[in-house]
Image (spheres, rainbow, N blue to C red):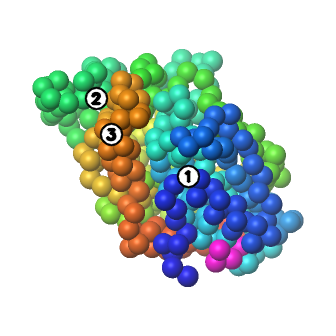
């Protein structure tokens, strides 16, 4: 079967294909309707499938569309796993939980963020406590998303960003921009001021569907960092922990870590993996981000800035809006058969490695 056939041109098609693949596999789809609609007026939802031995209490959890538009990438492997019947390989103690579009609004509207401009992967915090402060973001906010995103004003903004990059260094600049910020609701990588719909939905569905979990491997699909089609497994645990070491044992030395400085990603606050651990507090967790490369960093950053400007100040019905939406789609989803094959084959391999690792894992608590 051609892996490219598992991928979809838009959210509505992806949702329909996932649900059809689940039906063909004999699996029930549990649907969590989103309160808003897509740009075409269609329904939005997070759709979830549990498949595998009924008595299994160890789960490989595959999550997609934490960053909405990145759902193009994550949707393909979920549909492929069902279509190729990978679930038939499961040992008696392991099942799969497939979460299709935890941020359906962002997926449908071609946004990395959600309906409130919130970056879901910065939103899993205790909002009753003081929030992290990103002191380096504030001075560059006005240049990242200027009111006028063209001509002299844009040129001046770009010049100021170049100065900031020189002052902070490449890694420091990346941290300032993308590490997460909680002070500018109209800005980039905004973590919000309360749990989002997607945050609450994840915390609801996990106990409802796999509240019996004793062991969980969480795979979160992302795009936008790294070389074309390359999958970087990013360790979601602190160095020196058993979970940190487990990922290297299960997947190999290709695993990277933002905390040790080997990852293309910077350190983040409020990640979705924390929400998974809090929703299933009695399970032993092993979590990783699968980060697939698409375009160079500057290209991706321009797409994010353009989309943020569009939703802050632009006209969503304009010709320029169509250009920006095509830009951000291309920044996070390379619509080429070879890229799709690279995504799916590596995802399938890591899912299989996770199944084997989980099946053999000790019951001893970390």
Q: Secondary structure at mark 2?
A: helix
Q: In the rendered view, does 302 fall on the left or right side of 308?
A: left
**Residue sitting at x 48%, y 72%:** 4
Q: Please state the horizontal and vertical placement of residue 206, each as a whole percent of the image.
A: 74, 46
**Residue sitting at x 24%, y 45%:** 298
- Whether residue 205 is visible to the viewer of this picture, yes or no, is yes
Q: Mark 3 against mark 2, which lies toward the viewer?
A: 3
Q: Residue 154 lies in magenta, yes or no?
A: no
Quadrant of the rendered structure where residue 44 is?
top right
Residue pointed to by mark 2: 144
Mark 2–mark 1 distance (CA, rounded to whole Å): 28 Å
- Whether residue 202 is visible to the viewer of this picture, yes or no, is no
Of residue 168 and residue 54, the one placed in the foreground of this image is 54
**Residue sitting at x 24%, y 29%:** 149
Q: Secondary structure at mark 3?
A: helix
- Please rate how many residues cluster around mark 2, counting C-alpha atoms within 10 Å: few if below 14, some from 14 to 19, many from 20: many
**Residue sitting at x 44%, y 68%:** 340
Q: Residue 84 lies in magenta, yes or no?
A: yes
Q: In the picture shown, does residue 222 fall above or below 325?
A: below
Residue pointed to by mark 1: 11
Q: In the rendered view, does 42 fall on the left or right side of 106?
A: right
Magenta-tinted stretch? 83-87
Q: Mark 3 against mark 1, which lies toward the viewer?
A: 3
Q: In the picture shown, does residue 171 fall above or below 215?
A: above
Q: Earlier in the sequence, mark 3 or mark 1?
A: 1
Mark 3–mark 2 distance (CA, rounded to whole Å): 22 Å
């Amino acid at each position: 079967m051609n892996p490219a056939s598992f991928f979809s041109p838009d959210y509505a098609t992806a949702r329909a294909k996932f649900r059809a693949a689940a039906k063909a596999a004999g699996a029930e789809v549990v649907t969590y309707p989103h309160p808003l609609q897509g740009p075409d007026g269609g329904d939005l939802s997070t759709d979830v499938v549990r498949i595998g031995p009924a008595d299994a209490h160890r789960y490989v959890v595959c999550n997609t569309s934490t960053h909405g538009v990145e759902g193009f990438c994550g949707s393909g492997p979920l549909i492929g796993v069902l279509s190729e019947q990978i679930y038939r390989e499961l040992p008696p103690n392991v099942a799969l939980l497939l979460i299709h579009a935890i941020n359906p609004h962002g997926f449908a509207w071609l946004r990395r963020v959600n309906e409130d401009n919130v970056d879901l992967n910065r939103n899993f915090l205790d909002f009753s406590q003081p929030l992290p402060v990103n002191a380096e973001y504030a001075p560059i906010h006005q240049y990242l998303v200027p009111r006028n995103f063209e001509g002299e004003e844009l040129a001046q903004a770009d010049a100021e960003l170049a100065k900031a990059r020189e002052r902070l260094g490449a890694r420091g600049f990346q941290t300032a921009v993308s590490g997460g910020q909680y002070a500018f609701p109209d800005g980039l990588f905004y973590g919000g001021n309360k749990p989002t719909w997607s945050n609450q939905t994840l915390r609801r569905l996990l106990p409802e569907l796999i509240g019996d979990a004793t062991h969980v491997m969480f795979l979160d699909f992302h795009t936008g960092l790294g070389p074309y089609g390359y999958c970087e497994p990013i360790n979601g645990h602190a160095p020196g922990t058993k979970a940190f070491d487990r990922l290297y044992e299960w997947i190999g030395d290709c695993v990277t870590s933002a905390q040790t400085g080997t990852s293309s990603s910077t350190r983040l606050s409020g990640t979705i993996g924390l929400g998974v651990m809090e929703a299933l507090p009695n399970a032993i967790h092993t979590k990783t981000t699968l980060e697939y490369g698409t375009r160079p960093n500057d290209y991706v950053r321009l797409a994010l800035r353009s989309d943020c400007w569009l939703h802050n100040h632009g006209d969503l019905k304009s010709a320029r809006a169509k250009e920006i939406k095509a830009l951000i789609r291309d920044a996070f989803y390379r619509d080429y058969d070879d890229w799709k094959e690279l995504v799916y084959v590596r995802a399938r391999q890591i899912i299989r490695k996770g199944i084997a690792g989980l099946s053999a894992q000790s019951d001893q608590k970390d």
